[in-house]
Image (cartoon, helix red, strand yellow):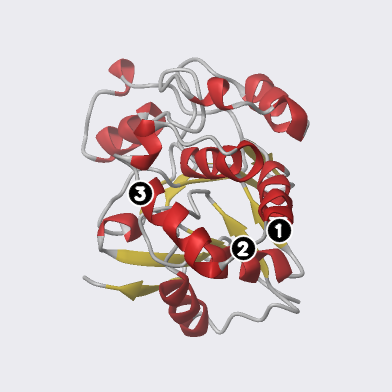
């Protein structure tokens, strides 16, 4: 029986992903690969990365904010300055031009990206890119998880306080609790027995909180640091990249 593996924010680092998967002895035919989103931007190999992920037998991503920008560019040609100038979009656009990707393949890649949900809820796992907004319950998460691709728009991802793509408060509360903060002043843990996995916030090493049912796996790939692949059942992990 295969494993459930999850990868942190890849940010177009195809080479690091290959190294980390090799360290993990990843078997595409047996293992499931989840992703916390932000597969694109900042790194050099967006096109090669998407082609690899598209071909996997069982790849289960969620949308990150960078994936929304990329999807909108591929489908509609949109290039907002916040993406191009500040978040690595210019390097991604150059990669598509250099790689000679046809217009039809671009649209197909954009449609493939749009199939990923904001929130993925499986039997044992919840996967979100950013986090859980204040006062959200499983009801709100299930509602977002059930949205069809056509209803997932960029505007819904812009508000950090109310979007699971941008939210950091859940991780911040979990980290504060583990450092001894008073639980009364922190965000309340989600009432679930499922394991929650997130990315979006770069940290030096994977972080885990039993109280918050939370594991954070973005270890800074988009900022010149490591890429992490983790076994979602055992929490064993493998890494590639700079210390």
Q: Nearer the viewer, residue 71 or 38?
A: 71
Q: Which residue is mark 3?
A: 88
The answer to whether residue 70 is above or below residue 142 is below
Near mark 3 (Cα within 10 A), the count class, few <14, some 14-19 or many ≥20, is: many
Query: Which residue is painted at 56% across and 21% down in the image?
Result: 156
Residue 228 lies left or right of residue 53; in this view the side is: left
The answer to whether residue 18 is above or below residue 76 is below
Image quarter in which the C terminus is found: bottom left
Residue 29 lies left or right of residue 91; in this view the side is: right
Q: Which residue is mark 1?
A: 105
Q: CA distance from mark 3 to mark 1?
A: 21 Å
Q: Nearer the viewer, residue 139 or 226?
A: 226
* Residue 193 image label: none
Total count of labels: 3
The answer to whether residue 240 is above or below residue 208 is below
Hey, which quadrant is residue 160 in on the image? top left
Residue 214 lies left or right of residue 54; in this view the side is: left
Q: Which residue is mark 2?
A: 101
Near mark 1 (Cα within 10 A), the count class, few <14, some 14-19 or many ≥20, is: few
Residue 185 position in % (x across, y down): 29, 16
Label 1 residue SS: helix
Image quarter in which the N terminus is found: bottom right
Label 2 residue SS: loop
Is any part of residue 129 visible from this angle?
Answer: yes
The answer to whether residue 145 is above or below residue 14 is above
Query: Which residue is painted at 50% across and 55% down in the image?
Result: 39
Q: CA distance from mark 3 to mark 2?
A: 19 Å
Q: CA distance from mark 2 to mark 1?
A: 6 Å
């Amino acid at each position: 029986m295969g494993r459930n593996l999850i990868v942190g924010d890849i940010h177009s680092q195809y080479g690091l992903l290959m190294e980390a998967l090799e360290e993990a002895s990843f078997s595409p035919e047996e293992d499931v690969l989840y992703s916390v989103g932000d597969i694109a931007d900042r790194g050099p190999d967006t096109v090669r990365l998407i082609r690899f992920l598209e071909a996997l037998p069982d790849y289960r991503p969620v949308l990150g904010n960078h994936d929304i920008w990329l999807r909108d560019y591929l489908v509609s040609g949109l290039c907002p300055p916040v993406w191009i100038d500040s978040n690595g979009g210019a390097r991604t656009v150059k990669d598509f031009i250099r790689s000679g990707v046809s217009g039809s393949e671009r649209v197909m890649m954009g449609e493939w990206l749009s199939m990923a949900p904001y929130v993925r809820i499986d039997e044992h796992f919840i996967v979100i890119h950013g986090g859980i907004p204040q006062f959200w319950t499983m009801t709100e998460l299930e509602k977002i998880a059930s949205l069809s691709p056509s209803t997932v728009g960029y505007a819904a991802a812009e508000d950090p306080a109310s979007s699971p793509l941008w939210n950091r408060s859940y991780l911040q509360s979990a980290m504060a609790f583990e450092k001894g903060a008073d639980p009364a002043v922190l965000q309340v843990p989600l009432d679930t027995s499922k394991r929650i996995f997130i990315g979006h916030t770069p940290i030096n090493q994977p972080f885990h909180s039993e109280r918050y049912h939370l594991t954070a796996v973005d270890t800074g790939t988009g900022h010149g640091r490591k890429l992490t692949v983790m076994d979602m059942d055992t929490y064993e992990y493998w890494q590639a990249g700079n210390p």
